[in-house]
Image (cartoon, helix red, strand yellow):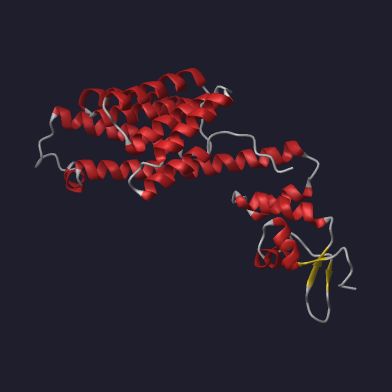
């Protein structure tokens, strides 16, 4: 019965495929990975050897946070690689949008820190705080920068929105060029490069990534700005299809990330590097 040589217990299957016994029991309850045999007396679950491959695929898909229903869809079409690839591509867009939201929130927080929360509160009441030309330009640069993030956060954009996103990134960089510091300029170049990478345009993505790195090097800018300058070059080369250069710049970014002072900033760089386009393989 349950002691047949080919059957695997929950614990044995869990160790073989890298899942926990708790996860396997949950996948049984939701009908995702149903055991071959359940002992009616003890309730112990047993799996056949043919289920090992399915369990490994479940582990791989869940490791990238693919929703259970989409994992179920992948299991239902094991021979349809194009269909699985389509699901993973859509999931990747959702993950990238999530990452862009975090980066956008981080940059908006940076602006609050640099400009002061009080300044943000009083900007709406210009009759008490006369605006200066430099202050207006700085606000415009920051608003455009944040607007680009909001568009990048969208999982799907119209052609008009993509045009607006691109023009806003360049406009933000222009205004930072009038009133910003070297750090603002490097971040503006980084954002232009990211927008072009998102749009799949390698040559301008590479150009702005190189400019961002040049600004960092010329002004001794380090920490996470330098790591992200390397990241933008890795991403732009990946968009261009140059895997060797993408790998080389990724290694530079990883090395620079080791010197980032704040753990959360380092984790953000590492997460961004993991989102650089690559072909996932689960077979």
Left or right: where 119 falls relative to 214: left
Left or right: where 277 falls relative to 210: right
Residue 228 is drawn in which quadrant? top left
Vertical order, 41 against 45 (above or below): below
Asked whether 201 or 19 is in front, the reply is 19
Residue 37 is drawn in which quadrant? bottom right
Vertical order, 192 against 281 (above or below): above
Q: Image quadrant for the C terminus?
A: top right
Residue 160 seen in this snapshot: no
Residue 92 is drawn in which quadrant? top right
Asked whether 38 or 133 is in front, the reply is 38
Image location (x, y in percent) of residue 281: 69, 40
Residue shown at 75% from the left, 60% from the top: 33
Residue 1 seen in this snapshot: yes
Number of numbered markers: 0
Left or right: where 106 falls relative to 12: left
- Looking at the image, which residue sits at the far bottom? 41
Image location (x, y in percent) of residue 115: 20, 41
Vertical order, 152 against 202 (above or below): below
Vertical order, 279 against 63 (above or below): above
Residue shown at 40% from the left, 26% from the top: 192
Q: Image quadrant for the N terminus?
A: bottom right
Asked whether 79 or 57 is in front, the reply is 57
Asked whether 96 or 278 is in front, the reply is 278
Image location (x, y in percent) of residue 221: 29, 31
Image location (x, y in percent) of residue 191: 39, 30
Residue shown at 61% from the left, 40% from the top: 90
């Amino acid at each position: 019965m349950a002691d047949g040589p080919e059957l695997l217990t929950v614990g044995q299957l869990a160790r073989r495929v890298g899942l926990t016994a708790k996860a396997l029991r949950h996948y049984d309850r939701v009908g995702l990975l149903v055991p071959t045999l359940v002992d009616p007396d003890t309730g112990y679950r047993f799996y056949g050897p043919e289920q090992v491959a399915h369990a490994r695929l479940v582990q791989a898909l869940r490791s990238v946070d693919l929703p259970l229903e989409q994992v179920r869809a992948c299991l239902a079409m094991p021979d349809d690689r194009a269909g699985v690839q389509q699901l993973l591509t859509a999931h990747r867009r959702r993950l990238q949008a999530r990452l862009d939201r975090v980066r956008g929130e981080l940059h908006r927080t940076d602006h609050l820190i640099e400009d002061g929360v009080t300044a943000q509160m009083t900007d709406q009441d210009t009759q008490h705080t006369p605006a200066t030309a430099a202050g207006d330009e700085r606000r415009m640069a920051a608003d455009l920068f944040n607007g680009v993030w909001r568009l990048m956060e969208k999982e799907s954009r119209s052609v008009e929105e993509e045009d607006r996103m691109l023009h806003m990134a360049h406009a933000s960089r222009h205004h930072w060029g009038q009133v910003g510091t070297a750090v603002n300029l490097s971040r503006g170049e980084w954002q232009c490069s990211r927008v072009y990478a998102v749009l799949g345009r390698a040559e301008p993505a590479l150009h702005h990534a190189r400019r961002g790195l040049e600004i960092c090097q010329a002004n001794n800018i380090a920490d996470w700005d330098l790591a992200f300058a390397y990241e933008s070059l890795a991403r732009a080369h990946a968009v261009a299809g140059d895997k060797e250069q993408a790998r080389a710049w990724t290694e530079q970014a990883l090395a620079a990330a080791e010197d980032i002072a704040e753990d959360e900033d380092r984790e953000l760089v590492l997460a961004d590097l993991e989102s650089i386009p690559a072909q996932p393989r689960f077979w």
